[in-house]
Image: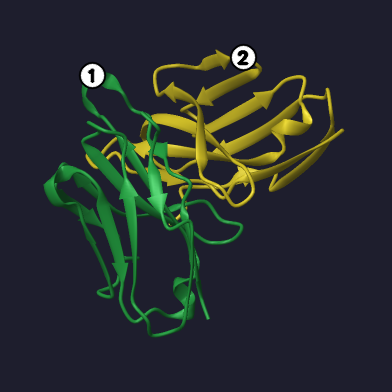
Chain colours: A yellow, B green
Amino acid sequence: SQQGEEDPQALSIQEGENATMNCSYKTSINNLQWYRQNSGRGLVHLILIRSNEREKHSGRLRVTLDTSKKSSSLLITASRAADTASYFCATEDRMDSSYKLIFGSGTRLLVRP
Amino acid sequence: DTGVSQDPRHKITKRGQNVTFRCDPISEHNRLYWYRQTLGQGPEFLTYFQNEAQLEKSRLLSDRFSAERPKGSFSTLEIQRTEQGDSAMYLCASSFRDYGVYEQYFGPGTRLTVT
């Protein structure tokens, strides 16, 4: 079953604008990870934020984590057409020794040139 | 190291046939995961291996599904008597859990279409 929901389900922006997508989850976590998936392809790992971290940056990506609200956000700054993809958050449950990932339903981002 | 590879990339089969998929993880990764993804949804966990031991199976994995990882290297996922509801993308991921490495690296997936 899905861990939670991502919001919005779809987002269309102009190249150069910022894109923000949100993720909610249900359980206590070890970490939260964001992945990108281009149409019909595998997932590419973008960034991982641990449960004791509040914010993390990687290039044009900024991730925040609020464990009290069980939510995270991914900000992509200065978007490019090549950022067009689906973005998924995934969590590791703190109580689960398998470390399997529980994914959200994803946000489909379209960056218009 | 070329990353996680999966074979075949696409498989079209008729209902009732058996299919087998292969996943080659990143070498020396001790954990291997299988996920299934249907259109418009995020991946859902199916099963995972630590070395050659299959340690957990999801309720999604009916008795028609079987997975192996002989010698803790590549893995196969077999679906017997396929049904149209099995149509999905099957994703494999590997990770090396020790030393605080947490990322799972995904392969390109095998897209299964059952007609």
Quadrant in which the N terminus of chain B appears = top left
Q: Residue furthest bottom?
A: B16
Residues at marks 2 and 1 on the same chain:
no
Q: Is residue A94 visible?
A: yes
Task: Classify residue A15 by image quadrant.
Answer: top right
Q: Are marks 2 and 1 in contact (CB under 8 Å)?
A: no
Residue type at mark 2 is: Gly
Q: Is residue A96 visible?
A: no
Residue A58: % across, % down: 57, 15
Q: Chain of mark 2?
A: A
User: Badge 1: how crowded within 10 Å, few (<14), some, or many (20+)?
Assistant: few
Using the image as rendered, state which of residue B82 and residue A63 is in the foreground: B82
Using the image as rendered, state which of residue B61 and residue B18 is in the foreground: B18
User: Badge 2: how crowded within 10 Å, few (<14), some, or many (20+)?
Assistant: few
Residue A56: % across, % down: 53, 15
Numbered disc 2: secondary structure: loop
The residue under label 1 is: B99
Residue A106: % across, % down: 60, 46
| Side (left or right) of B71 relative to B93 | left
How many numbered markers are drawn? Answer: 2
* Residue at x-position 27% and y-position 58%: B76
Numbered disc 1: secondary structure: helix
* Residue at x-position 83% and y-position 22%: A16
Q: CA distance from mark 2 to mark 1?
A: 25 Å
Mark number, residue A59? 2
| Side (left or right) of B52 relative to B87 | left
